[in-house]
Image: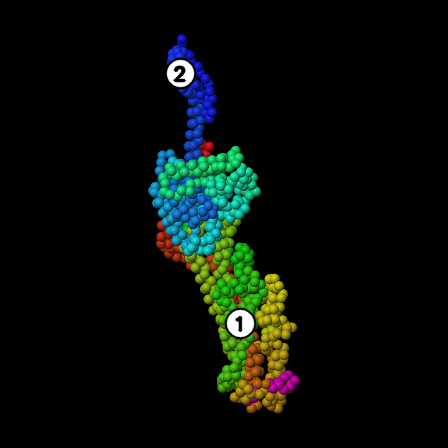
Amino acid sequence: MNEIQIQVQKEIPHSPAPLSVSLSLSPMATNPNSFMATPTKTPSDKSASASASSMSRKQSQSQHNSARFEAYNRLQAAAVAFGEKVPIPEIVALGGQSDGKSSLLEALLGFRFNVREVEMGTRRPLILQMVHDPSAPDPRCRFQEEDSEEYGSPVVLASAIADIIKSRTEALLKKTKTAVSSKPIVMRAEYAHCPNLTIIDTPGFVLKAKKGEPETTPEEILDMVKSLATPPHRILLFLQQSSVEWCSSLWLDSIREIDPTFRRTIIVVSKFDNRLKEFSDRWEVDRYLSASGYLGDNTRPFFVALPKDKSTISNDEFRRQISQVDLEVLRHLRDGIKGGFDEEKFRPHIGFGCLRDYLESELHKRYKDAAPATLALLEQRCSEVTTELGKMESKIQATSDIAHLRRSAMLYAASISNHVGALIDGAADPAPEQWGKTTMEEQSQSGLGGWPGVTAAIKPPNATLRLYGGAAFERVMHEFRCAAYSIECPPVSREKVANILLAHAGRGGGRGVTEAAAEIARAAARSWLAPLLDSACDRLAFVLGNLYDLALERNHSRDSEYGRKSEKMDGYVGFHAALRHAYNRFMKDLAKQCKQLVRHHLDSVTSPYSQVCYENEFQGGFGSSATSFYKSAGPFCVELTDGGSAAHDEIMRDQENIPPQKSGQQTTPGKGTEAREALRDSQMTVPETPSPDQPCDAILAGAKKDFGNGIDFGGVRKRISRLTGNSRNADHMRVQNGGGLLFGTGDGGLRSGSAYSEICSTAAHHFARIREVLVERSVASTLNSGFLTPCRDRLVLALGLDLFAVNDERFMDMFVAPGAIDVLQNERQSLQKRQKILQSCLNEFKSVARAL
């Protein structure tokens, strides 16, 4: 009989293609004594081809995933080294201390290295880059060098890994003098039993600081973890022990603040085996696994249990124990609980293996989705770094191009000077609310305090407004006027009056009383007004000195606003220091010159040769001078702050800061109508050797006869020379009438008093006259022309002469300080290195993008 061949097509479950079962029977098979041949399975040609194709696709997909993962790892290392803000998809592990984060990391790595003992997760983040490498049967771990993208030599011993983490953490915290730090440690682990996964392990939340740590450590950890988890491109892996109920979770609310809907949060219930013994029926375990009412319908937590054996075991045994725990948990859910559990719904979320596979697939999915945006961002950063490198090359080249550097520096100095002038003329940007100063702030920050010799509080209008520039200058001027008018002629002792009066009498002549009063007024003006003038100059110099920072801000904001590419001088620290120094010196010189000018005016009005004290009328009296004061004060007599009228009334009530109106009751001594009328007829005689207490009621009968009835000496006040001549006639009459001086009224009435009181009253009148002439005629115009005009017209010239009217060697000292060239070259090398790394990452991502 011929051989019979039977082919049976049988589809094997879980097989990619049907297999052909061939039974071959030889003629001997018909013999009852013969034995049956064993069936053999051989794949058909078609099924073998399909299987090979599927295998090829999987290998290709695995290679693409690996290439994409490596590209992101390199980019992440570069971002950490150079501080690049690249939105790389990353997994951030969050949770309280002792919630099992460290154990989960070890399980993902596939080996232990005792991270719990060094408490690595409590004080500094750790970026774990896990690379699946089939050629690495033993883990190869390398740490990225601090402030570099380079990795050190491989570390194999687990104890060495723990020591490195501990030493780096302690060194950085000691250097920064802090309890926690957000600067991460980067460790790359290549191992045949770990997935392609990158996780950032953060410090664990704590309720109380450890012994020896600041009390604010828990808050610092919470703030740092929130800052690490806030970027939207990061996936949050939140761990919580199974023994904690959702309603009493300490840290779930903190996670909800970062991600309110848990859209990018993966919740893991750790130490799940501790909770299993509490369940007996299916409805209990299903209700717990669903976490309904707390996490939302779309959030499915993972439930994980890991080995509790902490003894030293091999890596293979460690991985075997992890798998064994997963199997025991499932066995208990199926067999130990009445009715089991909803396996179809919850099985994909139970066990460490499911979590590991989900994390790896989710991260690679995010990598794939983010690849186009990452590619575009890399192209942008490469372009920006190339531009920065070009600028650095220009700076290095500029150190040899002195002409270009001079031109750039001159233009920059001119721009700052123009902005200072604009601020003086009333420019209101930058915002006065931020950059202006109140009167109290000016006084405290200038170090001058209040006005010397003034006991009353000077409260000028608009004192609480934040002003700068020309407005602040005018406010200080008005404040100076208020301070000056609040000072009266100080009281003088009888001994001083006697010394001055007797000394003048000894020189001959009869003008002792007039000269004594004038001398007292001059001395008081020099003593009390000179410090006020110096303080005013210093305050004005401080106000104008503050304009330098405002001019810098204004120059920067204008360039940004209009997109202009002005000369960039940001990197030249020496030049900026020299420019600021020249500006401050210019202001100090102005203050010194103005002090000399106003001192000269003070010396002029207080000179013995000045006729100011002998003028009985000044443009219609004190009332008209008050009117001129209000005109010169301008808008500063208008209160612009809240409650201005009330503040103004308080000022007028508490102090004589502002000259009284013509109809007011408060008048400067010696300037009122009554005082002028009392001085019109003067026929009182004093002895040739007068005394301060000598009565003034000795009237000679022949006085009116000799001088004539109704002669008005006070009426002769249009010219000082005439007043002086009449005084001489009066002095002559003193001698002719027994050495006395007569004081009387215009109608011949008699008035009694003393030379001391008359001298004090006249001195107060003279002091007010000197003060009025100095403040209104001299100081205001002098300070305006001495400060503001040079700032507008001469500032740019002064800065130019100070900075640029020097030889090239001295000029270059501002730009090429010792070691400056080395600093620039080091920055260039760093930029070149960054450009090279980013360009390499860009090329890798281009390859990845083409493979997608």
Q: In the rendering, at what x and y percent does residue 119 appear?
A: 41, 48
The answer to whether residue 385 is visible is: no
Q: Nearer the viewer, residue 732 or 622?
A: 622
Residue 327 falls within the magenta-colored stretch = no
Horizontal side of 830 relative to 452 (left or right) equals left
Look at 53% across and 41% down and name the residue there: 288
Disc 2 residue crowd, few under 14, some 14–19, many 20+, Cα 10 Å: some
In the foreground, 789 or 488: 488
Residue 62 in view here: yes
- Which element is circle 1 on? loop
In the rendered view, does 410 fall on the left or right side of 677? left
Q: Which residue in the structure is indicated by mark 2? A: 36
Percent of width and height locating residue 769: 56, 75
What residue sits 53% from the left and 87% below the top?
Answer: 691
The magenta span reads: 739-752
Label placed on residue 454? 1
Q: Name the residue type under label 1.
A: Val
